[in-house]
Amino acid sequence: MTNKNKGIFFIILSALGFALMSLFVKLSGDLPSMQKSFFRNLVSLIFAFFIIKKSNIGFKCKRENILPLVLRASFGTLGIIFNYYSIQNLILSDATMLNKLAPFFVIIFSFFILKEKIKLWQVLSILIAFLGSLFIINPNIIIGILNNNLPKTTLNSLPALVGVLGAMCAGIAYTMIRFLSLRGEKGPFIVFFFSCFSCLTILPFVLLNFYPMSIKQLIYLLLAGIFASLGQFAVTAAYANAPAKEISIFDYSQIIFSGILGYLVFNQKPDIYSFIGYFIICSVAIFMFFMNNKNK
C-alpha cells in the first residue's frame, strides 16, 4: 500500500472507532464531561504504554519536541472535553458533524504552523463550511441574516458552539500530530504523552467533583475508552502517513456511522436545517478533496 492508501484506511478506521466512542459516551448518561474524558484517556494510556513497551520505541522524546507535544496534548484534551459536552447535549449526528469542522481548522492552522500554502478556493471553502455549520448551531441566525434582523444567541445554541470550539481545538491537535511526525516522533509515543498529560491534568477536577457511577455506566465508559483508543491510534497513523488535505475527506464517514448508530439506538432524526448543514459541509469537503487531487 502507498502511504496515501494507508492514510485513507486508517482514517476510516478512526472514524468508526470515534463513532462507537460517541455512542458509548452518550449511553453513559449525565456524568460530568471531565469524568468521561478521564476514563477515555486512561484506557488510551494503558494501550499506549503496552504498545510502546512491546515495540521498544522508548518513553523519551527529543527536547525540541516537548513544546509541540504539550500543545498537542493541551488542545487535544480541551477538544475531547468540549466534544463530550456537545455529544451529551445534542443529537449524535449533529455533535459529530460539528466535530467534523476540524479538518477545515487543520487547513487554517497548517498555514500558520506548518507553513503550508493556502489558496483562495480553500479560503472560500472554509467560509462556506462555517456557513453550513450555522444551520446546525442556530438556524435563526441564517433567517435573521436574510431578514436583516439578527437574533440574540440563546442558551440552546451553547452546546453547538462548544462543539465548534472543540473542533477548533481538535484541528490544532491534528496539525501538531503532523508537525511531530515530520520531526520524527512515533505515533504510539504521541498518543502516550497525550493520554498521560490529559489524565494528570483532568484528575484533580474529577476528584473534586466525582459523580458516583453504576456498573453499567462504568462499562460504557470503558468501552468508550477502548474505541477512542482505536480511533486515536488510527488517526495518528493516518496523519503520519499522508497530508491532511489528501485524506481528510474520508474522515466524514464518521457522520454516516454516527447517523446510523443514533437512529438505531436513540431513534434520533436530524431536522431539515441540520440536513442542510450536513449537505453544505460534506459538499465542500468533497469539492476540496477533488481540487486537491486535481492540483496534484
Image (cartoon, helix red, strand yellow):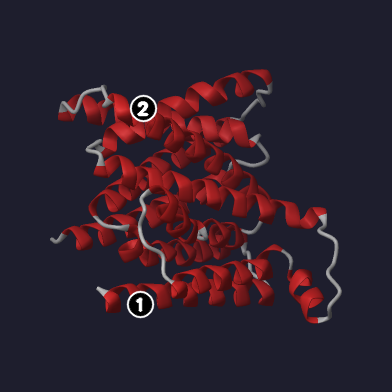
Q: Callout 1: helix, strand or loop?
A: helix
Answer above or below: position of 256 versus 82. below
Judge the density around disc 2: few (<14), some (14-19), many (≥20) Cα neighbours within 10 Å.
few
Return the x and y of residue 291 as percentages of the image width and height. 35, 77
Residue type highlighted by circle 1: Met
**Looking at the image, which is closer to me, 38 or 3?**
3
Residue 262, quarter of the rendered image: bottom right
Q: Residue at x 85, y 66 (%)?
A: 151
Question: Which residue, given by chain and number where applicable, does mark 2 sit on?
Answer: 66
Q: Residue at x 64, y 45 (%)?
A: 85
**Looking at the image, which is closer to me, 50 or 123?**
123
Question: Which residue, given by chain and number where applicable, does mark 1 sit on?
Answer: 291
Residue 245, quarter of the rendered image: bottom left
**Looking at the image, which is closer to me, 289 or 108?**
108
Left or right side of 6 for 215: right
Return the x and y of residue 33 as percentages of the image width and height. 62, 37
Mark 1 or mark 2: which comes first in sequence?
2
Q: Residue at x 54, y 51 (%)?
A: 168
Find the residue positioned furthest to the left.
1
Q: Callout 2: helix, strand or loop?
A: helix
